């Protein structure tokens, strides 16, 4: 499985999340984004995706 790196603002560190637990979103302007839950703190994490990352996930 592919892992995606997020930055958790609550724990202030990088967190790797499995791609099966990531939700893909499309913003109003057409840009792709990923949303996941931090496994340690339970808080939501959000990341804008580059074109390469978006192609890799979806």
Image (tube, rainbow, N blue to C red):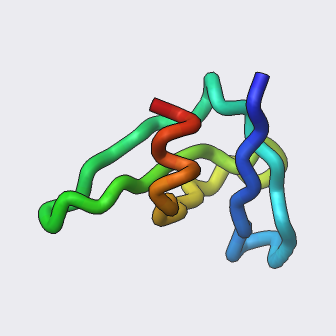
Q: Is residue 37 left or right of residue 4?
A: left
Left or right placement of residue 49 versus residue 21 in this view: left
- Quadrant of the frame with the N terminus: top right
Q: Residue at x 72, y 46 (%)?
A: 4
Q: Say if 5 sits above or below 7 in the image.
A: above
Viewer-proximal residue among 50 and 23: 50
Give how far across and how far down residue 50 sits, in percent.
50, 62
Left or right of 25, for residue 5: right
Q: Is residue 24 above or below residue 58?
A: below
Residue 9 percent location from the top left of the image: 69, 75
Q: Residue furthest left?
A: 28
Query: Where on the picture, by quarter, is residue 31?
Result: bottom left
**The C terminus - image quarter:** top left
Q: Residue shown at 63%/23% (left/top)?
A: 20
Percent of width and height locating residue 28: 13, 62
Q: Quadrant of residue 27?
A: bottom left
Question: Residue 56 versus residue 6: which sits nearer the camera?
Answer: 56
Query: Considering depth in this image, is 7 or 26 the residue closer to the camera?
Result: 26
The image shows a total of numbered marks equal to 0
Residue at (47%, 46%) from the top-left corner?
54
The residue located at (84%, 66%) in the rendering is: 14
Snapshot quadrant of residue 15: bottom right
| Above-or-below relation of 55 to 26 | above
């Amino acid at each position: 499985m592919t892992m995606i790196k997020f930055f958790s603002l609550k724990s202030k560190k990088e967190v790797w999340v499995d791609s099966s637990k990531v939700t893909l979103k499309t913003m109003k302007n057409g840009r792709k984004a990923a949303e996941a839950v931090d496994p340690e703190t339970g808080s939501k994490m959000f990341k804008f995706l580059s074109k390469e990352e978006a192609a890799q996930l979806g």
